Image (cartoon, grey):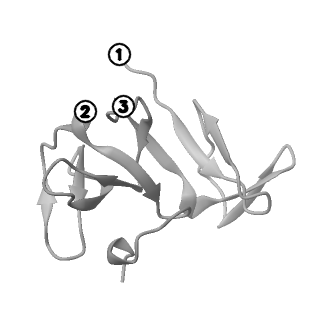
Amino acid sequence: MREIKFRVRDYFEEIWYFYNLLDFDCGKYKSVGGLCWDRDSIGLSTGLLDKNGVEIFESDHLETDEAGWIARVVFKRGRFVLLDNNGGFSLEPNWETCEVIGNEYENPHPELLEE
């Protein structure tokens, strides 16, 4: 059984915190022990690592081995998949050959921003 891990971005300090358990019963912003986090930034860990050993989270932007294709990690229908805004998707990406190049909050790629 894998560990269920989340990350959340501090709204004011603009840094990431990692949790094993998170209370979702809140408004858009919630203060816990001085941390004011943006509920929209909550991302679930895939439990996988990219080619550089970086942990992959929901909302990360990845460059794949498929000719530099860039896609966003999303959780759909019970699994993590890669999607872009042009209708492209990969249901079974080779995660170990991908590279995390940003996310929706830091280094966002305009072609992946949700409309």
What is the CA distance from the residue labelled 3 to the residue labelled 1? 17 Å
Q: Residue furthest bottom?
A: 115
Secondary element at tag 3: strand
Q: Quadrant of the N terminus?
A: top left
Closer to the observer: label 2 or label 1?
Answer: 2
Q: Front-most of 6 and 93? A: 93
Where's residue 29, x and y in %? 71, 64
Identify residue type, mark 1: Met
Q: Quadrant of the C terminus?
A: bottom left
Secondary element at tag 2: helix
Measuring 63% from the left and 44% from the top, which residue is drawn there? Answer: 23
First-in-chain label (2 vs 1): 1
Numbered label attached to residue 95 = none
Please indicate, yes or no, whether residue 74 appears anywhere in the rendered image: no
Numbered label attached to residue 49 = 3
Identify residue type, mark 2: Glu
User: Dot 1 corresponds to which residue?
Assistant: 1
Image label count: 3
Where's residue 77, x and y in %? 20, 51
